[in-house]
Image (spheres, helix red, strand yellow):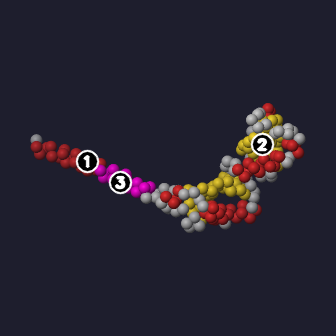
Amino acid sequence: MGSAKKPVKASKQAKSKAKPAAGKHARVRDPDVANADPVLFDPLTPGEAADAVRTLTEDRRLAAMAKVGRYRVLCTEPLVVKPPHWIAGHRLARVIAYDYSQDRAVDACVDLDAGVVAHLELSKGQPMLSRDEEALATSIAMVDPRVREKLAMSDRALTVMQYWGRTPTDVSYTRRSAAVVFGHTGGHASLVAVVDLIDQAVTQVVPAEQW
């Protein structure tokens, strides 16, 4: 009986030894995160942001966009990639731009250490409007004769929203557009002007109650 119990004890010991080994293996990746350089998370400096945009526009895949020059950078921000990715530990920048010449969104990861575009995605998606685009839409709407004749003296631009047309016949159904809402400060909206940001023109002027 005593000899029969020995294999059972040995089996339990083997199992108990295996557990610490598994736990130790599961913690192998922890030091990579704990020892990450804090600088990688810092906001981009003006110089880094400029370098990121320059590297992006010099990429041969965006040669046409850079040549025409009808694009707008919407966002530049630091990007950190976890190991074991090959660019983990590099100073990275995410650059989001909109190419008006081809009506497409550009989403790129720029490796600032190597000076290359590490990842590039082109799509027909619509990134959020930048503040510059909001200001541009407002200025375009303000000088449009159809808008000016319908505005009261106390009306001003209350807000600017990204806008997509509801039907395929709307110009804004596929083109990057903004809706500028006019009205009284602290009061109700009175007028909405839809601005095509690609051609920089007002495509619709609608009373707010019909919007």
Q: How far is the residue under mark 2 from the one under mark 1?
A: 71 Å
Graded by Cα atoms within 10 Å as few (under 14), some (14 to 19) or many (20 or more), the crowding at tag 3 reads: few
Location of residue 191 (image quadrant):
top right
Q: Return the residue at label 2.
A: 157
Earlier-in-chain disc, 2 versus 1? 1
- Where is residue 189 drawn, in percent x and y? 78, 35
Kindly identify the amino acid type of the residue bearing the numbered disc 1: Ser
Graded by Cα atoms within 10 Å as few (under 14), some (14 to 19) or many (20 or more), the crowding at tag 2 reads: some
Between tags 2 and 1, which lies in front? Answer: 2
Do the CB atoms of the residues marked 3 and 2 lie less than 8 Å apart?
no
Q: Residue at x 83, y 46 (%)?
A: 142
SS at badge 2:
strand
Graded by Cα atoms within 10 Å as few (under 14), some (14 to 19) or many (20 or more), the crowding at tag 1 reads: few
Q: How far is the residue under mark 3 from the one under mark 1?
A: 15 Å
Do the CB atoms of the residues marked 2 and 1 lie less than 8 Å apart?
no
Q: Is residue 211 visible to us here?
A: no
Q: What residue span does the magenta drawing correspond to?
A: 20-34
**Magenta stretch: dominant secondary structure:** helix
Kindly identify the amino acid type of the residue bearing the numbered disc 2: Ala
- The label on residue 25 is 3
Earlier-in-chain disc, 3 versus 2? 3
Split into 4 quadrants, where in the image is the N terminus?
top left
Q: Residue at x 89, y 41 (%)?
A: 149
Q: Residue at x 26, y 50 (%)?
A: 17
Kindly identify the amino acid type of the residue bearing the numbered disc 3: His
Earlier-in-chain disc, 3 versus 1? 1
Q: Residue at x 49, y 58 (%)?
A: 38
